[in-house]
Image (tube, rainbow, N blue to C red):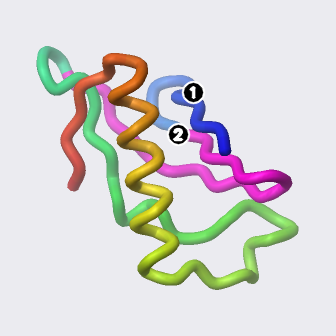
């Protein structure tokens, strides 16, 4: 599993060949980013037809938050 904070708005979450792009917004001050949990909807093609359970969405969000913690990035989840 890898998490990359790319550009101003994207979080790339990858598990093996499966990739998901979540949305974030950069903020001024602390917290530094706003993670949009509703954007954790589906993976990128060719796996976009595979459904994500609520438990899997939560696991992905937890992994993204853990990566932000490791990098010292402060965040809020909405």
The percent coordinates of residue 60 (x first, y second) are: 49, 58
Indicate whether 72 appears above or below 26. above
Indicate whether 40 appears above or below 77. below
Mark 2 or mark 1: whose residue is earlier in sequence:
1
Q: Please identify the quarter of the rendering in which residue 3 is found.
A: top right
Relative placement, left or right, of 73 versus 39 is left
Q: Which mark is residue 34?
A: none
Q: Which residue is mark 1?
A: 6
Residue at x 72% of width, y 53% of height: 15
Indicate whether 31 appears above or below 10. above
The verdict on residue 25 being magenta is yes
Residue nearest the viewer, comparing 57 with 7: 57
Relative placement, left or right, of 20 versus 41 is right
- Point out the image quarter for the N terminus: top right
Measure the C-alpha gap from mark 2 to mark 1: 6 Å
Q: Please identify the quarter of the rendering in which residue 12 is found.
A: top right
Crowd class of label 2 (few under 14; some 14 to 19; many from 20; radius 10 Å): many
Secondary structure that dominates the magenta span? strand
The percent coordinates of residue 54 (x first, y second) are: 43, 80
Circle 2 SS class: strand
C-beta proximity under 8 Å, tags 2 and 1? yes
Residue nearest the viewer, comparing 14 with 66: 66
Residue at x 85% of width, y 54% of height: 17
Residue at x 46% of width, y 26% of height: 8
Provide the residue span drawn in magenta: 11-27
Q: Which mark is residue 11?
A: 2
Residue at x 39% of width, y 53% of height: 62
The percent coordinates of residue 43 (x first, y second) are: 68, 65
Residue nearest the viewer, comparing 2 with 49: 2
Residue nearest the viewer, comparing 74 with 21: 74
């Amino acid at each position: 599993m890898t998490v990359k904070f790319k550009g101003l708005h994207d979080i790339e979450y990858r598990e093996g060949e499966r990739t998901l792009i979540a949305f974030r917004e950069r903020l001024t001050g602390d917290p530094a980013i706003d993670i949009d949990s509703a954007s954790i909807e589906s993976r990128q093609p060719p796996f976009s037809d595979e459904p994500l359970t609520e438990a899997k969405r939560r696991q992905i969000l937890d992994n993204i938050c853990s990566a932000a913690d490791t990098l010292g990035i402060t965040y809020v989840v909405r």
